Image (cartoon, rainbow, N blue to C red):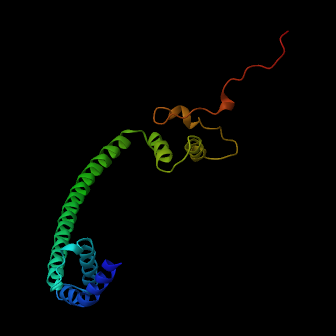
């Protein structure tokens, strides 16, 4: 109990002086943090605080706390600068890779036949299922609904571009007749 009372008296007597010292070297929020840290150190090392003029020891601790804060700020600034340089390099590298990838993709699409390209783009970019592009292309090729013959379905023409299977109803079904 004796230590606690002595420490509270140390804080009451010297706290305002340490705060004034820290305020002369920084803003209010930083000064209050410095005072708190100084008295945490003073509590942990209370056996090293002199009886006569303890404020001088507290000033020394405050000076070290402020120096630690400045060093930490410099390290943060250097780390932030290094990370921004790395981020710019990675962005530039990825832009080059994306640009090269886009060009090769455009070349590959240009090499396809128009209908194959359309099926591939409908499936990949528009998020269509395999049946969606086929029905869309079939409807687009059908000039009229009366008296016209149905066009050839799109799936056999485009099976090389996108693996589209024929509908199950076109597959041969086993006969259900009873054997004779």
Q: Nearer the viewer, residue 159 or 15?
A: 15
Along the line of sight, the residue nearer the viewer: 100 or 16: 16
The residue furthest front is 2
Residue at 35% x, 40% y is 108
- The x, y position of residue 125, in whole percent, is 46, 49
Q: Residue at 52% across / 49% down in the picture?
A: 127
19 w.r.t. 152: above or below = below
Residue at horizontal 50%, vertical 32%?
Answer: 159
The quarter of the rendered structure image containing the N terminus is bottom left
Q: Could you tell me which quadrant the C terminus lies in? A: top right
Q: Position of residue 90 (x, y in %)?
A: 24, 54
Give whichever of 133, 64 is nearer the camera.
64
Q: Nearer the viewer, residue 40 or 49?
A: 49
Residue 104 picture location, percent across and down = 30, 43
Where on the picture, by quarter, is residue 73? bottom left
Q: Quadrant of residue 23?
A: bottom left
**In this picture, residue 141 sits left or right of residue 113:** right
Pinpoint residue 162: horizontal percent, then vertical percent. Answer: 48, 36
């Amino acid at each position: 109990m004796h230590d606690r009372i002595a420490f509270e008296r140390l804080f009451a007597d010297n706290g305002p002086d340490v705060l004034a010292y820290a305020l002369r070297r920084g803003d209010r929020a930083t000064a209050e943090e410095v005072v708190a840290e100084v008295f945490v150190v003073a509590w942990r090392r209370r056996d090293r605080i002199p009886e006569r003029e303890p404020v001088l020891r507290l000033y020394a601790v405050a000076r070290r706390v402020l120096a630690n804060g400045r060093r930490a700020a410099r390290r943060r600034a250097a780390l932030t600068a290094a990370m921004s340089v790395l981020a710019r390099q990675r962005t530039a590298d990825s832009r080059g890779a994306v640009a090269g990838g886009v060009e090769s993709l455009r070349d590959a699409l240009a090499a396809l036949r128009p209908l194959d390209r359309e099926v591939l783009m409908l499936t990949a970019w528009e998020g269509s299922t395999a049946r969606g592009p086929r029905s869309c292309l079939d409807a687009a090729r059908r000039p009229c609904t009366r008296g016209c013959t149905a066009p050839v379905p799109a799936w056999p023409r485009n099976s090389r571009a996108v693996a589209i299977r024929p509908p199950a109803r076109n597959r041969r079904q086993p006969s259900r007749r009873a054997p004779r």
